Amino acid sequence: MQLHISPSMRSITISSSNEFIDLMKIKVAARHISYRTLFHTILILAFLLPFVFILTAVVTLEGVNKCSSIGRRLGPRLLGRIDDSERLVRDFYKILNEVSTQEIPDGLKLPDSFSQLVSDMKNNHYDAKTFSLVLRAMIEKFERDIRESKFAELMNKHFAASSVPKGIHCLSLRLTDEYSSNAHARRQLPSPEFLPLLSDNAYHHFVLATDNILAASVVVSSAVQSSSKPEKIVFHVITDKKTYAGMHSWFALNSVAPAIVEVKSVHQFDWLTRENVPVLEAVESHNGIRNYYHGNHIAGANLSETTPRTFASKLQSRSPKYISLLNHLRIYLPELFPNLDKVVFLDDDIVIQRDLSPLWDIDLNGKVNGAVETCRGEDQWVMSKRLRNYFNFSHPLIAKHLDPEECAWAYGMNIFDLRTWRKTNIRETYHSWLKENLKSNLTMWKLGTLPPALIAFKGHVQAIDSSWHMLGLGYQSKTNLENVKKAAVIHYNGQSKPWLEIGFEHLRPFWTKYVNYTNDFIKNCHILE
């Protein structure tokens, strides 16, 4: 495009670049237009003409070629039109909103895959509304299937966690048989010369209550190997009647000297009579309780209104171990060991990685129970437990006596001052609240032995440093491995125990390092082969 001004300044011509076509010609009378006006006119024309040219070109190109990118992108905007693709998207949103409020017809046949959906569209000539309805029905069906699969997975995991692995069952049977046929397996534990040490308060006394021989062996071995003074260790292993022979055989045949091990069955404690533990007798014989822990865990559960995580917590609370006498024994420690002043009570799903001797030097400030609190810590899932996580605060008795924001503490590794404990009414309080929960048909709490202990030990707990006891290795797969290595005691609380196939593979080695795979009984039973 070129601009020509005549020598006389009387005309202005705008022509194309090839000079054959004059696009615009303006004649100017000198008498009426000053040079200044002319100059301003030229500037305005020079500014406007490119836009006129672009608009003309867009209109022309859009008319000639409907697929022109310039026409598609600039033409509609400059001319105030709406792009077809934008209109299509807007219409589709409108259809989706309409379909989202409609009921899906009964018997609507749904494709099994996206490719089948596309095929059905071609064959049946679906309109946009029908397509949207079928798509919505497909998505909702897949969501239901995924949810049902998740609940089925949780149920299977619950059954796996509640069962006894074949290898561990084999170990118990073989060791029981060994007890009856091998005099060395029946030898007295400990030897007669060490019997006075069982009540000597100069030693470090550990109490372990379990019916799992393999787990007990790991707890004892890890404690002895991690100790700077193993000769000061005395282990009191308590088990049930059916496991006693096998448990005794294991520790009789596998010495952990210089540490001392005593193995006793609950029936060998004269104090454990029905008169002294009436509530536990009621718990084990109550039909409603047995149905709750051993019955159908799906019946009566509204899965449509329950999240998988909540359902998993409920399943864990229905583990049959919670009505076992072994699980309640810790509340009777002052009576079971009348001559001891201080003990460390251990669960069977822990591993000791550091010398625990300093625990006996911790000042409990006149409290009974030294425990790690579980309401603060790096892991916001594991270390976020307050009383509201364990109790039903809609129950009037719970709401009246407890604070939902009060910090909870953990069982698994506790230092108990038995002398101070004997001056309290902790056991009576424990029994009283168990009775109330039975009367209320388990509506006050569901989860095991910790809730009544949280009430009974109220005001009697001294918090100890969290590095002594790390929790969550049985349900938190994202556990920080560096923190695991630093902890004095690691606790596989949860369903994924390290001796089960559902245990977390990356956390299992911290436990298996203390399994004696050279032992003939372990090899013959193919333990964790």
Image: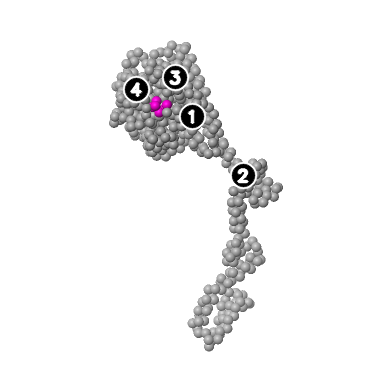
What residue does disc 2 label? 137
Tell me, yes or no, whether the two marked residues, 4 and 3, touch with CB atoms within 8 Å.
no
Residue 415, quarter of picture: top left
Numbered circle sitting on residue 334: 4
Name which residue type carries label 3.
Asp
Of residues 381 and 23, the one drawn nearer to the viewer in this rendering: 381
| Cα–Cα span, label 1 and label 2 | 36 Å
Q: Is residue 129 visible?
A: yes
Identify the secondary structure beneath mark 1.
loop
Which quarter of the image is occupied by the N terminus? bottom right
Numbered circle sitting on residue 240: 3
What residue does disc 1 label? 318
Which stretch did the figure color magenta? Answer: 430-435
Name which residue type carries label 2.
Ala
Name which residue type carries label 1.
Arg
Residue 445, quarter of picture: top left
At a point 49% along the width and 18% down the height, the residue shown is 173
Identify the secondary structure beneath mark 3.
loop
